[in-house]
Image (tube, grey):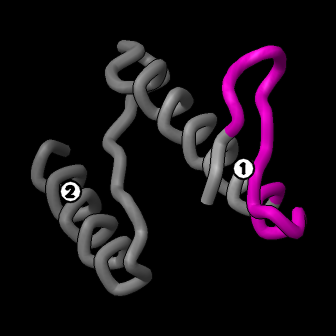
Amino acid sequence: SDAVCERTELDAICFAKEMQAEYWSVSAKTGENVKEFFSRVAALAFEQSMIKELESTPVHRAQIGAGNLISM
């Protein structure tokens, strides 16, 4: 029912806040927010990868492809 779904979503939001995590409401059925969610996951993974790369180099610099150097 709608009430049960609403309560479950509120519980999920509270749980995410407790974990200091993001909460995303997505629907495989309608496609709502699916693309945006996976884009966010990819962006977070890329960010963590870049931070790790920057921290592992003595000068705290990294380059992506033929682009400019990124400094930390």
Question: For residue 58, what is the image quadrant?
Answer: bottom right
Whether residue 50 is in magenta: the answer is no
Give the labeled residue for mark 1: 50
* Image position of 60 (left or right of 20): right
Q: Amino acid at mark 1?
A: Met
Magenta residues?
A: 53-69
- Category of crowding for the residue at label 2, using alpha-carbon neighbours closer than 10 angstroms: few (below 14), some (14–19), many (at least 20): few
Q: Which residue is pictured at 38% across the width and 34% down the height? A: 26
Q: Which residue is pictured at 11% across the width and 53% down the height? A: 3
Give the labeled residue for mark 2: 4
* Image position of 5 (left or right of 22): left
Q: Which residue is pictured at 46% across the width and 33% down the height? A: 37
Q: Earlier in the sequence, mark 2 or mark 1?
A: 2
- Category of crowding for the residue at label 1, using alpha-carbon neighbours closer than 10 angstroms: few (below 14), some (14–19), many (at least 20): some
Q: Amino acid at mark 2?
A: Val
Q: Which mark is residue 8?
A: none
